[in-house]
Image: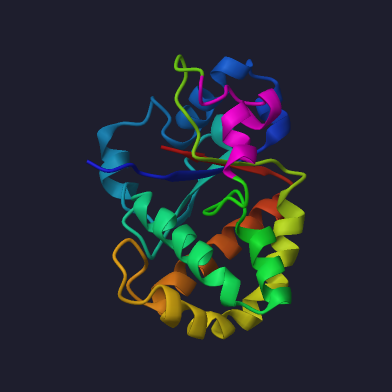
Amino acid sequence: MGLDLTVVVADWERLRETPVGKRIEALEDGIWPPELDDTYYLTYGTTKGWVRHPGEDVAWCAEYRFFCTSGAYKWHSRAGDAWADMRPLADTSLREQMDRFLNGLIWDRDPAEDPTLTGAGGFFPPITDHRHPPTLLICPPDAAPAKARAWQWAAPRLDELRGPFTAECEGWAGRPDTFEAFTALVTEWGAVITETARRGCGLVGLP
């Protein structure tokens, strides 16, 4: 079975109250509270979009479930690889804004600087700490507004990437099947990061 991606927006200040080694567990309990029974899962388990589970104790975080994917991480990885392929052909100004928006979400400008490697400077356990589940992405609250502004600038110009996508990605295994599939996923990420910035929260990707 492949890797899944669960995207969670969370109040960083609330997380600060939790010991570092327990923060990922707190997020997991926030989006799937252990006290909920099977009836809840059967009713809401396939809900898409923003899902905030009942109870005041979990009001500090919410899960986003993508409409255009099955929940598997591979769709996000493929879109990130597609951007890496096509970005050299993109207009410079558009490339810069898309880089700012996508970096650390589904694409890494410099993998060695990936915040998940160090747990975002110690806010979460680093991925080398095998005592804790790893994170797939970390976007702290102070990084979200710049990403949201970059997306707002780039969104109206997405169609300019159609040519680069056709030239570098179309028909290749391990890439989105169509340009529309790529832009649909990227647009959902735009909505996610915009809402994250609006709330003044951070974003975490859990496997």
Q: Is residue 20 above or below residue 167?
A: above
- Asked whether 122 or 164 is in front, the reply is 164
- Asked whether 111 or 126 is in front, the reply is 111
5 relative position to 139: left or right = left
Q: How many tags in the picture?
A: 0
Q: Is residue 82 above or below residue 44?
A: below
x and y percentages locating residue 106 in the rendered image: 52, 54
Which residue reaches farthest left? 1
Q: Is residue 149 above or below residue 8?
A: below
Quadrant of the rendered structure where residue 176 is?
Answer: bottom left
Q: Looking at the figure, which quarter contains the C terminus?
A: top left
Magenta run includes residue 125:
yes
* Residue at 65 percent of width and 39 percent of height: 113
- Asked whether 178 or 72 is in front, the reply is 178
* Residue at 56 percent of width and 16 percent of height: 21
* Residue at 57 percent of width and 43 percent of height: 111
187 relative position to 195: left or right = left
x and y percentages locating residue 68 in the rendered image: 38, 65
x and y percentages locating residue 182 in the rendered image: 44, 71
Main SS category, magenta section: helix
Quadrant of the rendered structure where residue 167 is?
Answer: bottom left
Q: Is residue 137 above or below residue 15?
A: below
Magenta run includes residue 45:
no
x and y percentages locating residue 116 in the rendered image: 57, 34
* Residue at 55 percent of width and 84 percent of height: 159
Give, as a single range, the part of the protein colored magenta.
111-128
Q: Is residue 45 visible?
A: yes
120 relative position to 4: left or right = right
Q: Looking at the figure, which quarter contains the N terminus?
A: top left
58 relative position to 121: left or right = left
Q: Is residue 60 visible?
A: no
- Asked whether 151 or 109 is in front, the reply is 109
